[in-house]
């Protein structure tokens, strides 16, 4: 049994290739200690992120979703993160009505050189998710018929 | 001359230059109006106006893209037309708008609570102080406030926002009236997240994935390319699970954020009465707070998610 079983939650991160993904790499190269709950999906730009990625992830049972892109005005494609900011802010406002704690989703900006800031972001967000606990989505939706049997990717706690 | 007759005359005059004019006619029984597509002058005689004109005529507009059509609108329908024009989904010069002042439409679900069988209502009189129905059990008289659709109780747009022909006295909006939809959202948000999710799961259990909510939506213009049914990308499986059903509602709600004109057709069309309009109304509340924008009231305005500001006014970038 893995040593972290029961202690780790499942957090999915959508990171911009040009900054935050590099920032996370910088943090790793610098050997900064980070919580291990986060799984990263690399995307070409925060503007590539459809808010439905986040909805689908949360409905799939993820305990938290973190989105990180380039700082406003620093987008590799000039304006992707400005559009992303509007969409993600709207989504954050909509999560409460579907019964998901808005604290399970955050978005932020981290540049490629900000390894320390990345460490801080990951640590803070992971603490926030641990304070909220495991997501009730799987238990609530799984109680109804028709759900497919789990195809893996469960949180380590399950 | 009655306003309806004035409009009929205008439609007859405009008809030679148009593919058709969309309106309402008496349906299969006196309680149900159905859409009417007027192509010949004699079709115009069948046009009706009143609280039974429930359907949003703007829903059909995007299907006539590239053709010149006319559309008879209630105030709320005209918002959908304006939003379609804003998004360049229809051209202003391709659509002739006929407007009449609308006092409200009835919610047949509410009427249905007062009669045993909606299909056996043999006569309807909506001209008086109450809605009078003739049923096999005898005459029924329903107070208007009990049968108006929720959207009508707080309606601010009784008259067409833009129109080429308008007949009748414009109705002033009632301010400070009850807003049942806002009350519904407040009640839902007062629940704990897990309880609210369980509430939606329980409601979605009834969903049969007929997509009537999407098909009746004037803003759903993707037709055969809806991501709920494409295999590539494969957003949704065919599983009959509440997760997929709730996911579809979120797809619809997020795709309508900043576009939804709250005509209520999705919820009206739902054959199992799932209160799905709350999801769209919430999205609109968020848009209103963040961008001070309301869909479908200004043909020149740019929808908020189509644009951005370098320094946003109301987005608080939470520091880390």
Image (cartoon, coloured by chain):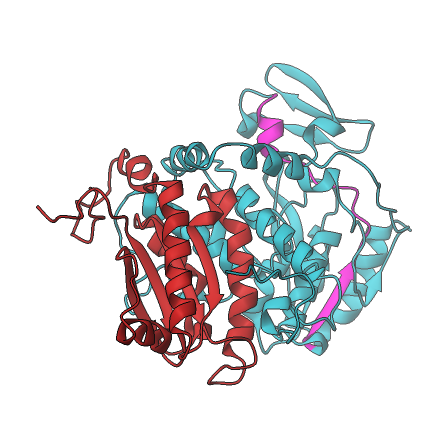
From the rendered image, report the letter of the chain displayed in red: A
Q: Is residue A155 above or below residue B118?
A: below
Taking the view exactly as shown, the residue that stands out farthest to the top is B137
Left or right: residue A137 versus residue B30 is left
Query: Across the whole image, how many numbered discs are drawn on residues?
Result: 0
- Please provide percent x and percent y for residue B2: 88, 49
- Between residues B175 and B285, which one lies in front from this camera angle? B285
Left or right: residue A69 versus residue B42 is left
Q: Is residue B110 magenta?
A: yes
Q: Is residue B40 visible?
A: no
Residue for point 70% across, 26% down: B146
Colour of chain B as rendered: cyan
Left or right: residue A136 versus residue B190 is left
- Please provide percent x and percent y for residue B234: 29, 64
In the image, the segment drawn in magenta is B94-114
Taking the view exactly as shown, the residue that stands out farthest to the bottom is A77
- Please provide percent x and percent y for residue B280: 56, 50
Q: Is residue B240 magenta?
A: no
Left or right: residue B196 versus residue A139 is right
Taking the view exactly as shown, the residue that stands out farthest to the left is A1
Q: Is residue A29 visible?
A: yes
- Please provide percent x and percent y for residue A144: 28, 34
Q: Is residue A16 above or below residue B286?
A: below
Q: Quadrant of residue A138?
A: top left
- Between residues B190 and B245, which one lies in front from this camera angle? B190
Residue for point 54% across, 20% down: B116
């Amino acid at each position: 049994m893995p040593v972290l079983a029961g202690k780790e939650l499942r957090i999915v991160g959508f990171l911009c290739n040009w900054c935050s993904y590099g920032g996370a790499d910088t943090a790793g190269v610098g050997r900064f200690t980070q919580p291990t709950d986060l799984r990263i999906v690399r995307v070409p730009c925060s503007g590539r992120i459809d808010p439905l990625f986040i909805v689908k992830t949360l409905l799939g049972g993820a305990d938290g979703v973190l989105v990180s892109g380039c700082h406003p005005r620093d987008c590799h494609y000039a304006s992707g993160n400005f559009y992303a900011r509007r969409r993600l802010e709207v989504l954050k406002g909509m999560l409460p009505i579907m019964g998901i704690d808005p604290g399970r989703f955050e978005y932020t900006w981290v540049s490629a050189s900000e390894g320390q800031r990345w460490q801080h972001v990951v640590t803070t967000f992971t603490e926030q998710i641990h304070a909220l606990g495991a997501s009730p989505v799987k238990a609530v939706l799984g109680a109804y018929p028709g759900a497919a049997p789990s195809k893996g990717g469960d949180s380590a706690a399950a | 001359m009655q306003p309806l007759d004035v409009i009929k005359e205008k439609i007859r005059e405009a008809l030679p230059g148009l593919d058709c004019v969309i309106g309402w006619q008496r349906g299969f029984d006196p309680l149900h109006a159905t859409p009417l597509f007027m192509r010949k002058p004699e079709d115009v005689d069948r046009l009706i106006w009143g609280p039974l004109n429930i359907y949003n005529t703007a829903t059909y507009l995007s299907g006539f893209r590239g053709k010149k059509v006319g559309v008879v609108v209630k105030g709320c329908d005209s918002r959908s037309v304006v939003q379609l024009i804003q998004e360049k989904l229809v051209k202003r010069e391709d659509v002739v708008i006929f407007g009449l002042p609308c006092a409200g439409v009835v919610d047949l679900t509410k009427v249905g609570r007062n009669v045993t069988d909606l299909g056996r209502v043999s006569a309807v009189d909506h001209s008086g102080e109450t809605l009078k129905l003739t049923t096999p059990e005898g005459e029924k008289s329903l107070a208007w406030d009990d049968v108006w659709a929720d959207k009508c109780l707080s309606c601010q747009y009784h008259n067409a926002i833009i129109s080429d022909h308008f007949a009748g006295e414009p109705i002033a909006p009632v301010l400070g009236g009850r807003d049942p939809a806002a009350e519904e959202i407040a009640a839902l948000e007062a629940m704990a997240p897990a309880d609210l999710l369980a509430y939606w799961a329980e409601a979605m259990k009834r969903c049969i994935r007929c997509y009537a909510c999407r098909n009746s939506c004037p803003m759903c213009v993707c037709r055969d390319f809806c991501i709920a049914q494409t295999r590539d990308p494969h957003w949704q499986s065919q599983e009959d699970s509440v997760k997929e059903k709730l996911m579809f509602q979120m797809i619809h709600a997020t795709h309508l954020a900043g576009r939804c004109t709250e005509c209520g057709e999705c919820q009206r069309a739902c054959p199992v009465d799932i209160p799905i309009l709350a999801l769209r109304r919430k999205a609109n509340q968020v848009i209103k707070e963040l961008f001070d924008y309301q869909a479908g009231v200004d043909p020149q305005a740019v929808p908020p998610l189509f644009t951005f500001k370098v320094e946003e006014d109301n987005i608080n970038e939470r520091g880390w």
